[in-house]
Image (spheres, rainbow, N blue to C red):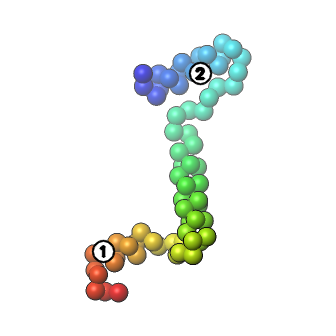
Amino acid sequence: MSITQQYLLDSYRARVLGEPEPPAPGRHDADTMREVRDYRRFRAVVAERPAQGRVRYALRRWLHPRAL
């Protein structure tokens, strides 16, 4: 069963039972990704590491090891 079919089934069941419909698939993806990013930045600060630019710094270090 696909995500869309499951959503339609859940929506129908909620309508029949008089309950609120579930959110559409993918509706909260951006919010979830933002929360994950914020959590990773928070964990970096708590661990006393730079909170931003870590991936770029790691790539630069890997691609140009003598530049630093």
57 vs 41, left or right, is left
Q: Are marks 2 and 1 in contact (CB under 8 Å)?
A: no
Q: Provide residue 27's location: percent of width, then percent of height.
A: 56, 39
Q: Provide residue 32's location: percent of width, then percent of height.
A: 56, 48
Image quarter in which the C terminus is found? bottom left
Q: Under tag 2, what secondary structure?
A: helix
Question: In the image shown, does 42 or 52 lie closer to the viewer?
Answer: 42
Query: Which residue type carries mark 2?
Result: Ser
For label 2, the residue is 11
Residue 39 drawn above or below residue 16: below
For label 1, the residue is 62
Q: Provide residue 23's location: percent of width, then percent of height.
A: 60, 33
29 vs 63, left or right, is right
Residue depicted at 28% across the width and 86% down the height: 66
Residue 23 drawn above or below residue 49: above
- In the figure, residue 20 lies in which quadrant? top right
Taking the view exactly as shown, the residue that stands out farthest to the right is: 18
Image quarter in which the N terminus is found? top left
Residue depicted at 59% across the width and 54% down the height: 35
Residue 40 drawn above or below residue 48: above
